[in-house]
Image (cartoon, helix red, strand yellow):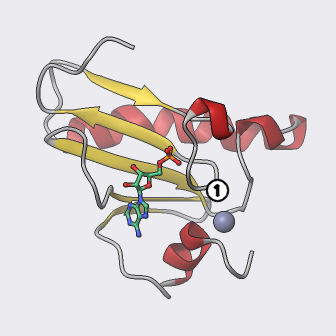
Amino acid sequence: MDDCIFCKIVRGEIPSKKVYEDEDAYAFHDINPAAPVHLLLIPKLHIDSLASADPRHTELLGKLLLIVPKLAKQHGLDTGFKTAIHTGRDGGQVVFHLHLHILGGGKISHI
Ligand code: AMP
Ligand code: ZN
């Protein structure tokens, strides 16, 4: 997607504080952290939101979920972390490229 900000981050056209990359996924620090550690994990493939995912993405989505605890461990979140996916306008989604928030480093609000 030409004008998607997270696609631009994946392509290196917008700077990011990268913490992880493989052939399918990319992770970086959220620019406006809501917790001491606030990472965003995204698929390199542009998918608008979880509502746009379909069975072709099953393996990719599973892979992303399994990266989450690895990143949490690397960032010292040994006592726990929160993973959130905002979906759609009323779900609080602002950037329409599927992303997982990984939050930790302090007591994180419940829901
Ligand atoms: P949401 O779509 O509500 O799940 O959240 C989008 C998140 O992306 C917000 O937490 C923003 O702070 C974050 N964000 C937006 N632009 C950037 C950027 N250029 N680099 C890092 N994080 C960003
Ligand atoms: Zn995108």
Q: Quick one: quadrant of the N terminus? A: bottom right
Residue 77 at x, y percent in the picture: 18, 31
Residue 83 appears left or right of 22: left
Q: Which residue is mark 1?
A: 97
Q: Secondary structure at mark 1?
A: loop
Q: Quadrant of residue 62?
A: top right
Question: Does 68 sit above or below residue 18?
Answer: above
Number of residues whose C-alpha sits closer than 10 Å to that of mark 1, classed few (under 14), some (14–19) or many (20 or more):
many
Residue 111 appears left or right of 77: right
Residue found 59% across the figure and 65% down from its top: 23
Question: Is the distance from the Cβ of mark 1 to the nearest ligand 2 atom less than 8 Å?
Answer: yes
Extreme residue in the front direction:
90
Residue 8 at x, y percent in the picture: 56, 79
Residue 91 appears left or right of 35: right
For badge 1, the amino acid type reads His
Residue found 56% across the figure and 41% down from its top: 64
Residue found 47% across the figure and 84% down from its top: 12
Q: Whereabouts is ligand 2, in terms of quadrant?
A: bottom right
Residue 36 at x, y percent in the picture: 13, 41
Q: Quick one: quadrant of the C terminus? A: top left
Extreme residue in the bottom direction:
13
Question: In the depicted view, which residue is nearer to us: 51 or 64?
Answer: 51
